[in-house]
Amino acid sequence: MSLGHKLTIVLVAFVAILVTVICVAFRERRLGKSLAADDIHGQQASDGRVLAVIFSAIFGGMVLTLLAAWIVFL
């Protein structure tokens, strides 16, 4: 497998992570609008889910960075 193919796989994985974060964030935003204004616990849970996805995506991006460096330099 050539270097170009390996880096294409890393790029596709990065785009998949990005698409997942965007979809979950917009879904939670849409669902959050249907919550009552006085439902503080529901709003906090929605915010928590969005933050969990964002931070897990950050760690996924770090892993992809290490993978890309390993592919290129070894």
Image (tube, rainbow, N blue to C red):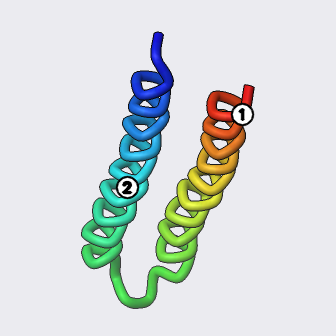
Residue under circle 2? 24
Indicate the position of residue 67 as horizontal and vertical percent values. Answer: 66, 34
Q: Nearer the viewer, residue 9 or 27?
A: 9
User: Who's the residue at 37% across and 46% down the image?
Assistant: 15
Indicate the position of residue 9 as horizontal and vertical percent values. Answer: 43, 28
User: The residue tagged with tag 2: helix, strand or loop?
Assistant: helix
Q: Which mark is residue 1?
A: none
Indicate the position of residue 73 as horizontal and vertical percent values. Answer: 71, 33
Q: Quadrant of residue 71?
A: top right
Q: Amino acid at mark 1?
A: Phe
Apparent side of residue 38 relative to residue 58 in the rendered image (left or right)? left
User: Who's the residue at 71% across and 40% down the image?
Assistant: 66
User: The residue tagged with tag 1: helix, strand or loop?
Assistant: helix
Q: Residue furthest top?
A: 1
Residue under circle 1? 73
Q: Amino acid at mark 2?
A: Val
